[in-house]
Image (cartoon, rainbow, N blue to C red):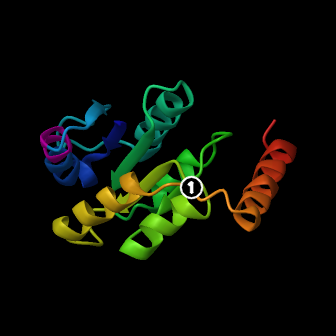
Amino acid sequence: MKVIIASDHAGFEYKTFMVKDLHEKGYEVLDLGTDSEKPTDYPDHAADVAKAFLNKEGERGILICGSGVGVSIAANKFKGIRAGVCHDTYSAHQCVEHDDANILCIGQRVIGIELAREIIYIFLNAQYSNAPRHARRVEKIIAIENKNMK
């Protein structure tokens, strides 16, 4: 699986750790920055990951900022992106299995690195169930998106 990952300065430490860890586990990784703890703007990194995902440069995306919230808000401005903030393992698999999420957002200032690592691998290994009730709900999300995101 190819994973697209980026962070702002507030998520740089976790991103750096995870890029190495993902490579060691055999994942192909597209690292879109940032490359230091020098302050950057999280919407730029969220846009980079969203565009790369929509261009089929990877199968899942990961965004890390201080809280996970800012990158989620920015990424969800792109039609076709379903980015979820997950700071627990249940949400990490449920957002994929039920909601067909394609980008995981986490906050370096919210959770520890080992929990972040566990959440990331649960997210990456989860599969959309396509059960009728979930498919119906995702179709409704897509309809809302189509109506409101021209």
Q: Main secondary structure of the magenta part?
A: helix
99 is within the stretch colored magenta: no
Q: Which residue is mark 1?
A: 128
How far from the left and from the top, in percent, is residue 41? 39, 43
The stretch in magenta equals 19-24
How far from the left and from the top, in percent, is residue 119? 32, 64
**Is residue 129 depicted above or below 23 in this figure?**
below
Q: Residue at x 25, y 47 (%)?
A: 9
Left/right placement of residue 98 relative to residue 142 reads left
**Is residue 76 depicted above or below 93 in this figure?**
above
Q: Residue at x 82, y 53 (%)?
A: 144
Comparing 67 with 24, the one in front is 24
For the C terminus, the quadrant is top right
Report the residue that reaches farthest toward the right: 147
For the N terminus, the quadrant is top left
**Is residue 63 depicted above or below 47 in this figure?**
below
- Name which residue type carries label 1: Tyr
Image quarter of residue 133: bottom right
Q: Are there few (<14), some (14-19), or many (20+) residues within 10 Å of tag 1?
A: some
SS for dot 1: loop
